Image (spheres, rainbow, N blue to C red):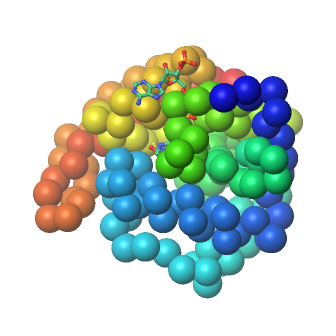
Amino acid sequence: MNTTTLTVRLAGSEDTEDILRIYNQGIGDRIATLETGLKDSAYMKNWFEEHQGRYSVMVAEQEGAVIGWASLKPYSHRCAYSGVADLSIYIERGFRGKGVGSVLLESLEAAAQANAFHKIVLFTFPFNHGGQGLYRKRGYREVGVLEKQGVMDGAFIDVMVMEKLL
Ligand SMILES: CC(C)(COP(=O)(O)OP(=O)(O)OC[C@H]1O[C@@H](n2cnc3c(N)ncnc32)[C@H](O)[C@@H]1OP(=O)(O)O)[C@@H](O)C(=O)NCCC(=O)NCCS
Protein backbone atom coordinates (compact mmCIF):
# COMPACT_ATOMS: atom_id res chain seq x y z
CA MET A 1 0.00 0.00 0.00
CA ASN A 2 1.20 3.51 -0.79
CA THR A 3 1.08 5.29 2.56
CA THR A 4 1.81 8.66 0.91
CA THR A 5 -1.89 8.77 -0.04
CA LEU A 6 -2.93 8.44 3.62
CA THR A 7 -4.36 11.43 5.43
CA VAL A 8 -4.06 11.56 9.20
CA ARG A 9 -6.22 14.10 11.04
CA LEU A 10 -7.91 14.76 14.36
CA ALA A 11 -11.16 12.83 14.60
CA GLY A 12 -14.52 14.56 14.81
CA SER A 13 -17.81 13.30 16.20
CA GLU A 14 -18.79 12.35 12.63
CA ASP A 15 -16.06 9.66 12.73
CA THR A 16 -17.44 7.72 15.70
CA GLU A 17 -19.29 5.12 13.59
CA ASP A 18 -16.07 4.29 11.71
CA ILE A 19 -14.12 4.21 14.98
CA LEU A 20 -16.78 1.88 16.42
CA ARG A 21 -16.65 -0.50 13.43
CA ILE A 22 -12.86 -0.80 13.62
CA TYR A 23 -12.85 -1.13 17.43
CA ASN A 24 -15.39 -3.95 17.26
CA GLN A 25 -13.16 -5.78 14.78
CA GLY A 26 -10.32 -5.58 17.32
CA ILE A 27 -12.62 -6.85 20.09
CA GLY A 28 -13.80 -9.72 17.90
CA ASP A 29 -10.24 -10.74 17.04
CA ARG A 30 -9.37 -11.22 20.75
CA ILE A 31 -5.91 -9.80 20.14
CA ALA A 32 -6.06 -6.19 21.25
CA THR A 33 -8.16 -5.71 24.36
CA LEU A 34 -9.66 -7.55 27.32
CA GLU A 35 -13.06 -6.21 26.26
CA THR A 36 -15.18 -9.05 24.84
CA GLY A 37 -18.60 -7.46 24.34
CA LEU A 38 -19.12 -5.53 21.13
CA LYS A 39 -19.75 -1.81 21.65
CA ASP A 40 -22.61 0.29 20.32
CA SER A 41 -23.04 3.86 19.07
CA ALA A 42 -24.05 5.22 22.48
CA TYR A 43 -20.88 3.80 24.06
CA MET A 44 -18.72 5.32 21.34
CA LYS A 45 -20.38 8.73 21.57
CA ASN A 46 -19.67 8.81 25.30
CA TRP A 47 -16.10 7.54 24.69
CA PHE A 48 -15.50 10.30 22.18
CA GLU A 49 -16.73 12.96 24.59
CA GLU A 50 -14.17 11.68 27.12
CA HIS A 51 -11.38 12.03 24.55
CA GLN A 52 -11.27 15.78 24.15
CA GLY A 53 -8.67 18.46 24.78
CA ARG A 54 -5.22 16.96 25.29
CA TYR A 55 -6.53 13.42 24.89
CA SER A 56 -6.47 13.32 21.11
CA VAL A 57 -8.20 10.87 18.81
CA MET A 58 -6.74 10.72 15.30
CA VAL A 59 -7.98 8.85 12.25
CA ALA A 60 -6.20 7.65 9.11
CA GLU A 61 -8.14 8.12 5.88
CA GLN A 62 -7.57 6.51 2.51
CA GLU A 63 -9.60 7.83 -0.43
CA GLY A 64 -12.16 9.30 1.97
CA ALA A 65 -12.58 6.14 4.04
CA VAL A 66 -11.45 5.91 7.65
CA ILE A 67 -9.22 2.81 7.95
CA GLY A 68 -7.66 3.29 11.38
CA TRP A 69 -7.69 5.30 14.55
CA ALA A 70 -5.45 5.97 17.51
CA SER A 71 -6.16 7.72 20.79
CA LEU A 72 -4.66 8.89 24.06
CA LYS A 73 -6.33 8.60 27.41
CA PRO A 74 -5.12 9.52 30.90
CA TYR A 75 -2.73 6.97 32.40
CA SER A 76 -3.93 8.14 35.82
CA HIS A 77 -6.09 10.93 37.19
CA ARG A 78 -3.40 11.84 39.75
CA CYS A 79 -1.81 15.13 38.69
CA ALA A 80 1.71 13.74 39.20
CA TYR A 81 1.07 11.61 36.09
CA SER A 82 -0.42 14.34 33.91
CA GLY A 83 2.50 14.06 31.47
CA VAL A 84 1.81 10.38 30.79
CA ALA A 85 -0.75 9.23 28.20
CA ASP A 86 -2.07 5.72 27.56
CA LEU A 87 -2.24 4.67 23.90
CA SER A 88 -4.87 2.72 21.92
CA ILE A 89 -4.56 1.99 18.20
CA TYR A 90 -6.72 -0.04 15.84
CA ILE A 91 -6.45 -0.56 12.08
CA GLU A 92 -9.24 -1.92 9.86
CA ARG A 93 -8.71 -5.67 9.34
CA GLY A 94 -7.95 -5.54 5.63
CA PHE A 95 -5.38 -2.76 6.06
CA ARG A 96 -3.20 -4.19 8.83
CA GLY A 97 0.49 -4.82 8.18
CA LYS A 98 0.60 -2.20 5.40
CA GLY A 99 2.19 0.70 7.26
CA VAL A 100 -0.98 2.52 8.34
CA GLY A 101 -0.31 2.04 12.06
CA SER A 102 3.22 3.44 11.70
CA VAL A 103 1.98 6.63 10.01
CA LEU A 104 -0.87 7.07 12.46
CA LEU A 105 1.28 6.51 15.55
CA GLU A 106 3.92 8.96 14.34
CA SER A 107 1.21 11.64 14.03
CA LEU A 108 -0.30 10.81 17.41
CA GLU A 109 3.12 11.06 19.09
CA ALA A 110 3.57 14.52 17.55
CA ALA A 111 0.14 15.54 18.88
CA ALA A 112 1.06 14.14 22.30
CA GLN A 113 4.24 16.20 22.39
CA ALA A 114 2.35 19.31 21.31
CA ASN A 115 -0.04 18.67 24.20
CA ALA A 116 2.79 18.50 26.77
CA PHE A 117 2.91 14.75 27.30
CA HIS A 118 6.45 13.52 27.93
CA LYS A 119 5.65 9.82 27.76
CA ILE A 120 3.29 7.31 26.21
CA VAL A 121 2.60 3.99 27.91
CA LEU A 122 0.59 1.10 26.54
CA PHE A 123 -0.70 -2.28 27.61
CA THR A 124 -0.59 -5.08 25.07
CA PHE A 125 -0.72 -8.87 24.96
CA PRO A 126 2.55 -10.82 24.66
CA PHE A 127 0.97 -12.71 21.71
CA ASN A 128 0.05 -9.53 19.80
CA HIS A 129 2.97 -9.69 17.39
CA GLY A 130 1.58 -7.02 15.07
CA GLY A 131 1.27 -4.60 17.95
CA GLN A 132 4.75 -5.30 19.26
CA GLY A 133 6.21 -4.97 15.76
CA LEU A 134 4.68 -1.53 15.48
CA TYR A 135 5.70 -0.39 18.96
CA ARG A 136 9.28 -1.62 18.72
CA LYS A 137 9.63 -0.01 15.30
CA ARG A 138 8.47 3.30 16.83
CA GLY A 139 10.98 3.00 19.70
CA TYR A 140 8.82 1.68 22.53
CA ARG A 141 10.60 -0.48 25.09
CA GLU A 142 9.19 -3.44 26.98
CA VAL A 143 8.83 -2.57 30.65
CA GLY A 144 7.69 -6.03 31.68
CA VAL A 145 4.87 -8.53 31.67
CA LEU A 146 2.13 -8.54 34.29
CA GLU A 147 1.28 -12.21 34.75
CA LYS A 148 -2.36 -13.29 34.88
CA GLN A 149 -3.33 -9.62 34.87
CA GLY A 150 -6.71 -9.97 33.20
CA VAL A 151 -9.38 -12.50 32.40
CA MET A 152 -10.69 -13.00 28.88
CA ASP A 153 -13.28 -15.61 27.98
CA GLY A 154 -12.70 -17.27 31.34
CA ALA A 155 -8.90 -17.58 31.03
CA PHE A 156 -6.13 -15.55 32.67
CA ILE A 157 -4.19 -13.31 30.28
CA ASP A 158 -0.71 -11.81 30.70
CA VAL A 159 -0.39 -8.12 29.83
CA MET A 160 2.83 -6.52 28.57
CA VAL A 161 3.61 -2.92 29.53
CA MET A 162 5.56 -0.82 27.02
CA GLU A 163 6.63 2.83 27.11
CA LYS A 164 8.26 5.56 25.04
CA LEU A 165 9.72 8.82 26.28
CA LEU A 166 8.80 11.48 23.75
C1 LIG B 1 -1.36 -3.58 15.88
C2 LIG B 1 -1.70 -2.65 14.71
C3 LIG B 1 -2.27 -1.34 15.26
C4 LIG B 1 -0.40 -2.35 13.94
O1 LIG B 1 -0.70 -1.48 12.88
P1 LIG B 1 -0.28 -1.88 11.39
O2 LIG B 1 -0.74 -0.87 10.46
O3 LIG B 1 -0.72 -3.27 11.17
O4 LIG B 1 1.32 -1.82 11.55
P2 LIG B 1 2.39 -1.48 10.41
O5 LIG B 1 1.96 -2.09 9.12
O6 LIG B 1 2.67 -0.02 10.42
O7 LIG B 1 3.63 -2.30 10.94
C5 LIG B 1 4.59 -1.78 11.83
C6 LIG B 1 5.66 -2.83 12.05
O8 LIG B 1 5.15 -3.91 12.78
C7 LIG B 1 5.62 -5.15 12.24
N1 LIG B 1 4.46 -5.98 11.98
C8 LIG B 1 3.29 -5.60 11.40
N2 LIG B 1 2.43 -6.65 11.40
C9 LIG B 1 3.08 -7.67 11.99
C10 LIG B 1 2.73 -9.01 12.31
N3 LIG B 1 1.51 -9.50 12.02
N4 LIG B 1 3.64 -9.78 12.95
C11 LIG B 1 4.85 -9.30 13.26
N5 LIG B 1 5.25 -8.03 13.00
C12 LIG B 1 4.37 -7.23 12.37
C13 LIG B 1 6.43 -4.87 11.03
O9 LIG B 1 7.79 -5.06 11.39
C14 LIG B 1 6.17 -3.44 10.74
O10 LIG B 1 7.35 -2.78 10.41
P3 LIG B 1 7.84 -2.64 8.86
O11 LIG B 1 7.36 -1.29 8.43
O12 LIG B 1 9.30 -2.72 9.00
O13 LIG B 1 7.22 -3.74 8.08
C15 LIG B 1 -2.73 -3.30 13.74
O14 LIG B 1 -2.19 -4.48 13.21
C16 LIG B 1 -4.07 -3.61 14.39
O15 LIG B 1 -4.98 -2.79 14.37
N6 LIG B 1 -4.21 -4.82 14.98
C17 LIG B 1 -5.46 -5.17 15.67
C18 LIG B 1 -5.73 -4.25 16.85
C19 LIG B 1 -4.55 -4.20 17.81
O16 LIG B 1 -3.91 -5.20 18.07
N7 LIG B 1 -4.29 -3.01 18.37
C20 LIG B 1 -3.22 -2.81 19.33
C21 LIG B 1 -3.67 -3.14 20.69
S1 LIG B 1 -2.32 -3.14 21.89
Q: In the current view of this chain or complex, which residue is farthest to the bottom?
A: 42
* Residue situated in front as seen by the camera: 132 or 114: 132
Residue 90, above or below 12? above
Q: In the current view of this chain or complex, which residue is farthest to the left?
A: 155
- Tell me the quadrant of the picture where the N terminus can be found: top right
Residue 55, above or below 114? below
Q: Point out residue 100 in the picture as x, y percentages from the top left corner.
A: 65, 34
Q: Residue at x 61, y 80 (%)?
A: 41
Where on the picture, by quarter, is residue 143? top left
* Residue situated in front as seen by the camera: 28 or 89: 28
Residue 48 seen in the figure = no
Q: Point out residue 70 in the picture as x, y percentages from the top left corner.
A: 65, 47
Left or right of 158 on screen, residue 39:
right
Q: Residue at x 35, y 36 (%)?
A: 128
Q: Residue at x 63, y 40 (%)?
A: 84
Residue 154 seen in the figure = yes
Left or right of 134 on screen, residue 155:
left
* Residue situated in front as seen by the camera: 103 or 34: 103
Q: Point out residue 29 in the picture as x, y percentages from the top left corner.
A: 36, 54
**Number of on-image labels:** 0
Where on the picture, by quarter, is residue 77? bottom right
- Tell me the quadrant of the picture where the C terminus can be found: top right
Q: Residue at x 14, y 64 (%)?
A: 154
Q: Point out residue 105 in the picture as x, y percentages from the top left corner.
A: 67, 34
